[in-house]
Amino acid sequence: MAQSFTISRREFNDLYKRVDALWKMNVESGTGLELSKSRSAVSIKKAPSVRGVAEVEVDIKPVTIVKTIADGDTSMTVRIVAYADTPPGEALRFVDAEFTAYPYWGDVTIDDYRGLEFTGETPDTSTTVFDARKDNDIWILSRPSIANNLRIARVVSTAQDTIFVQPLRETFSGDGRTLEPDGDVEAVPVWPKLNGNDYRQHIAPGVIILLLNASGTWYAYQTIPLRVLPKSPIRRASCPLSFA
């Protein structure tokens, strides 16, 4: 026979309050404890440890430089860009106000971003977009890619230290890839130790050269031409292309 015992009403009410408080108890996160409840028991135990790197929320925004970088500048003025349409097409738009960003860490300087600014009213396919990452309340721009520092052009005429080029851009259609003028004819200096007349041989139909952006100045860099054959991708000439 089960043993019986008697308690007073005060003791019963006190026991009821304690059990009710135990059932309502919660364990705060970060205490290293786990709480489980069932009809027969309330269990508190140490949570299993998890090794690894804690998740860190990273704030990254797509931006473009909207103010020309001047001599002596240590920061850049940028603005967030986004797609203008839904679903997305090629059209872009500016979002929110301008803010300040700084060059990427390491061997990158602010001069590496020169020539990649966009100062028009509405961003378009010619706009160079960077990832800006927030680090301790400071926005840092991603490293400029090599593609951002290269352009293609056709040689129009040459001089001693300068050549005149027609910048080009690639377009794609059902007939394949073609090249179209991209802006007006520009005068660009030749790469150091080269002569503008070295590029005279490149004045020919279908021949293009590379332009390289170095510290904000576009140079005629390549001395061995690329030839575009009709209805085919760009192919290299018989002499290999060298970036040495």
Image (spheres, rainbow, N blue to C red):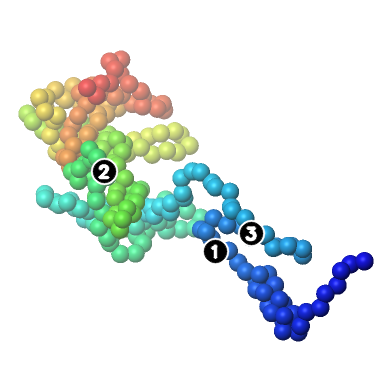
The kind of secondary structure element at disc 2 is loop
The residue that mark 1 highlights is: 28
Above or below 181: residue 239: above
Question: For the residue carrying disc 1, how many other residues have a C-alpha within 10 Å: few (<14), some (14-19), or many (20+)?
Answer: few
Above or below 146: residue 24: below
Question: For the residue carrying disc 2, how many other residues have a C-alpha within 10 Å: few (<14), some (14-19), or many (20+)?
Answer: few
Q: Amino acid at mark 2?
A: Trp
| Comparing labels 3 and 2, the label whose residue is closer to the camera | 3
Q: Are marks 1 and 2 in contact (CB under 8 Å)?
A: no
Residue 243 x/y as whole percent: 24, 24
The kind of secondary structure element at disc 3 is strand
Picture residue at 47% right of the left edge, 53% below the top: 88
User: What is the distance, in whole Å, between disc 3 and disc 2 at their CAs?
Assistant: 48 Å
Question: Hey, which quadrant is residue 192 in on the image?
Answer: top left
The residue that mark 3 highlights is: 44
The residue that mark 2 highlights is: 105
Residue 197 x/y as whole percent: 11, 24
Above or below 183: residue 94: below
Picture residue at 15% right of the left edge, 52% below the top: 73
Q: Amino acid at mark 1?
A: Glu
Q: Are marks 3 and 2 in contact (CB under 8 Å)?
A: no
- For the question of whether residue 114 can be seen, the reply is no
| Comparing labels 1 and 2, the label whose residue is closer to the camera | 1
